[in-house]
Image (spheres, coloured by chain):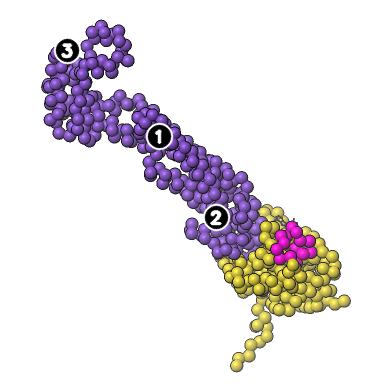
Amino acid sequence: MLLDFALPAHDRKLIPEGRLSGPMPWVIAIILFLTLLVAASGLTLAHAAQQGGQDLARQFTVQIIVTDPFERAAKRAEVTQYLRQVDGIRSVEPLSDASVRKLIEPVLGADILDADIPVPALIDVRFVHAQAQANLRTLRASLRRIAPDVRLDPHSAWMAPFYRLMHMLLVLAGTVFLLLMAATSAVVILAVRSTLNTHRGTLEIMHLMGGTDLQAARLFQRRVALDALWGGFVGFCAAAFVMATLSDQLAAAEPSLLAGVAFPVYGWIILALIPLAVTALAMLMARFTVISALKKML
Amino acid sequence: MRFVPFLALMQSVVEFDNVGLRYGTGAETLTDLSFTLYPGSFYFMTGASGAGKTSLLKLLYLAHRPSRGAIRIFGHDAITLPRNRLPGFRRRIGVVFQDFRLVPHLSTFDNIALPLRIAGIAERELRGPVAEMLAWIGLSERADARPAMLSGGEQQRVAIARAVIGRPEILVADEPTGNVDPEMALRLLQLFSALNKLGTTVVVATHDIHLLRDVEGAQMMRLDNGRLSDPTGSLRYPPKPLVLRN
Ligand SMILES: Nc1ncnc2c1ncn2[C@@H]1O[C@H](COP(=O)(O)OP(=O)(O)O)[C@@H](O)[C@H]1O
Ligand SMILES: [Mg+2]
């Protein structure tokens, strides 16, 4: 049905298509530009969250709380040794007391730490794969046999508030995207109606001269599709330009800060599909509107 | 060889049987219309303004269905004809609307070519006939002009050319002489008459009874308040030619 787009040249003359019909293509361009930007941010967020989430799901911290510094060092060595021979663990990095102090200092303040507060022993553990809960439970039980006061904390637990924020932003982006798509559809419907009103006389004449509903539908479909395609193209180019500029700026910024922020390749495909989907929607709407208008005539 | 009686060849083009038309819930606009139109005949339909001429023509060119009664066009029951077969019938009927209804964004050439394009005739096959038609109405030089750039009389000629280009079996014209001077009116009637001689059934609605003198052999139907009023009943089956001459 969308193939009806290709009309014989002489049929195309029946509805003028040289110039754009009014402000509608521009409105479609603007609203699609916004839609595409929101979609791009959403895709970037989702991509970053997924990448980061996979990394974090493999990272754990083992914490041993023992007051006596010598015993603490002994337990740390023992647990480290045990962990090193467990299958599926890529790396085990015990942190010295000094580096743990450095980590905690900004949180508790140097004064309190100087007052000889015991610091926990920390061991950084990276698994090859993300771990199932059951595995973690067995591992915890084994570690407790070595050191009763041991804790095994996933990094993702610290990151939970950050992920909740990301999740909220994603839901927000999705909602705004859906609202903008609804607005786009409304604009498309208005564009179809205005095209229909502009050419109602032509439509009636064609009808009375024995034009079929399909002939008229094809003409309108084409007219509206050209507007939507044009608007979609302009909106897409504008959005792509903004994204290219932004990604240059990101690359120039502190690399480690935004290392995970990148726009995935599949994102471009999704972005390109959006204007095409809007065009297809416009064609369907045009067809539906024209045929239902004609059905009211005999 | 078998002998075919002449009357059997004279199959009707249009038959109205007890047709009534009601817009909405009001009184009937057209009441008890029964008549037959024969191929190659020329009919004038007269009646005061508001008598129902345009309404009757709309039934004839399949823009409306009647509220009651039966209509046969080209030997088919127009009432029960499925909607998807109507375009084929409409292509056999040429219409000159009272207000011309030219397509404003199309040139004179494209307006006249419209029925042929709708019928799917190839571009190279329609160029010749349209040029011929342009010459016939004396507008060859204005082939590229939009309707807005044409005078009223020129627009009318374009409307007529568009109605006849497809060699319709029925030509319906609604007050085609309404807004033109008597000389142009006469010219238009000669045009219709020429077409009629080629075999087209012509129906011209007019409130100007004097036109009847200008076409030899034309018959008259008179509408009065939505009823066919002919004191002699001569327009019932079969219509008796009503010939007026000056
Ligand atoms: N679409 C319509 N809806 C309602 N009434 C109509 C419509 N068209 C015509 N009429 C009424 O039908 C009557 C006949 O109108 P019309 O057929 O235009 O007469 P004529 O062409 O002889 O002047 C008039 O009273 C007119 O008001
Ligand atoms: Mg009228």
**Label placed on residue A251:** 1
Looking at the image, is B17 positioned above or below residue A278? below
Secondary structure under tag 1 reads helix
Q: Is residue A235 left or right of residue B14?
A: left
Looking at the image, is A260 positioned above or below residue A65? below
Of badges 1 and 3, nearer the viewer stands 1
Asked whether residue B94 appears in the rendered view, the answer is: yes
Secondary structure under tag 2 reads helix
| Residue range of the region highlighted in magenta in the rendering | B142-157
Query: Residue A103, located in which quarter of the rendered image?
Result: top left
* Residue occupied by mark 3: A69
Q: Give the amino acid type for the residue marked by disc 3 in the picture.
A: Pro
Pick the front one: B81 or A200: A200
Q: Is residue B200 left or right of residue A260?
A: right
Of badges 1 and 2, nearer the viewer stands 1
Residue B61: give x, y in percent of width and height.
67, 66
Residue B152: give x, y in percent of width and height.
78, 61
Is residue B149 part of the magenta span, yes or no?
Answer: yes
In this view, which residue lies farthest toward the top?
Answer: A115
